Amino acid sequence: MIKKTVFEDLFVLDLANNHFGDVKHAKKIIGEFGKVRKKFNIKACLKFQFRNLDTFVHKNEINNKKNKYVQRFLSTRLEFNDFKILKDFCKKNKFLTACTPFDEESIDEIEKIGFDYLKIASVSSNDWNLLERAANNNIPKIISTGGKTLKEIDKIVSFFSHKNQNFALMHCVALYPSSNSDMQLNTIKDLKERYKGINIGWSTHEEPENLLPSTIALSLGASMFEKHVGINTSKYKLNNYSTSPIQFEKYLNNFFQTKLSLGGIQKAVDKNERKTLNLLDRGIYLRKDIKKDTFLKRDHVYFAFPKSRNQISASEISFKLDKVKLRKKINKDKPLNFKDVKIYQRSNAYRVSEFLHKVKAQLNYNKI
């Protein structure tokens, strides 16, 4: 049994700047997505972003109108106490909470307010001063890797591993929005194989109606899914990569249908599947009259369709490995039934082979 982690089956819903610096609007988003969370009974966290804007934006750049990010950060400002109010409101709506710090002072506030997860953004995942400060607490870390090479991700994994941190990685493409050709989703599989035992997720910026990337990401083994979320109002408009509650419902419906279709890690055989195949199986018939107490050989029998209910099928006896002795005489072209034979144990070679296959399968399962 694989032990589940705090990251397993987690949906990270990023409010980002969709709150527009408006506590009332942010609460409305949380409330609407809370209804969807309850409907689908998912493990989800609302994610905020922290910047100590008094020091994060350089004092000489505050009036820089050409830099859209400076103006966005300043115009959507909330005080840390406002985020405490929103964090408590998330808890009322049964959400876990996460927060992305962009400076060291913001980590102080994350610790004080008590978020469930600390998210490292792609832009900060090689910011070693910030990472050193983040590693001073035991809050589970979710780390996005957009724009990072495998060599850079190796350093991130090495750093947090040596710091004994509980962390997970998000494959991310830092393009807003992302087209299907941008996504490099096979990286999820690569990261899973490269970093055994570390949860790998998919942080996504495709257009909200595009369900293909999440379908593929889940199929490749992603265990966390991050989306930007918000709601449209007459005052505030969603950007083209953020998801509305209705779109999120479609997303989750597709997600769980995909998960249902994928099934478990190990192959399971349905009894109705076996029943159907049994009806289509060939039965064993005698090629000539065979006396009682005769040990059957391959040239004594032939296989033909259909097979009767109690007849031995072509798939049930291996004549290379089994010894089958007749209990009575059976005439030519008659079916070979279970009651007509004594089936001896299979050879030791078969048992050894079967054991080795089981061991190999278990080893592969434990690597997942």
Image (cartoon, rainbow, N blue to C red):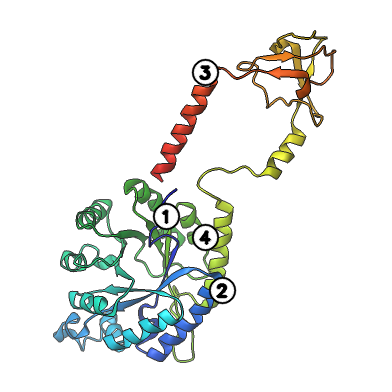
| Nearest to the observer: residue 179 or residue 337 | 337
Disc 4 designates what residue? 212
Would you call the spot at circle 2 few (<14 residues within 10 Å), some (14-19), or many (20 or more)?
few
From the image, state whether disc 2 or disc 3 is nearer to you: 3
Q: Which of marks 4 and 2 is nearer the N terminus?
A: 2
Disc 3 designates what residue? 349
Classify mark 3: helix, strand or loop: helix
Q: Callout 3, which amino acid?
A: Ala
Gap between marks 3 and 4 measured at Cα: 47 Å
Do residues under tags 3 and 4 come within 8 Å of each other at their CB atoms? no
Q: Which mark is residue 39?
A: 2
| Nearest to the observer: residue 139 or residue 328 | 328
Q: Callout 2, which amino acid?
A: Lys
Gap between marks 4 and 1 measured at Cα: 11 Å
Q: Earlier in the sequence, mark 1 or mark 2?
A: 2
- Quarter occupied by residue 89: bottom left
| Nearest to the observer: residue 253 or residue 284 | 284
In the rendered image, residue 121, in percent from the top left (x then y), is placed at 29, 68
Would you call the spot at circle 3 few (<14 residues within 10 Å), some (14-19), or many (20 or more)?
few
Q: Which mark is residue 185?
A: 1
Residue lying at 52% horizontally and 27% vertically, measured from the top left:
354
Classify mark 4: helix, strand or loop: helix
Q: Earlier in the sequence, mark 3 or mark 4?
A: 4
Gap between marks 4 and 2 measured at Cα: 23 Å
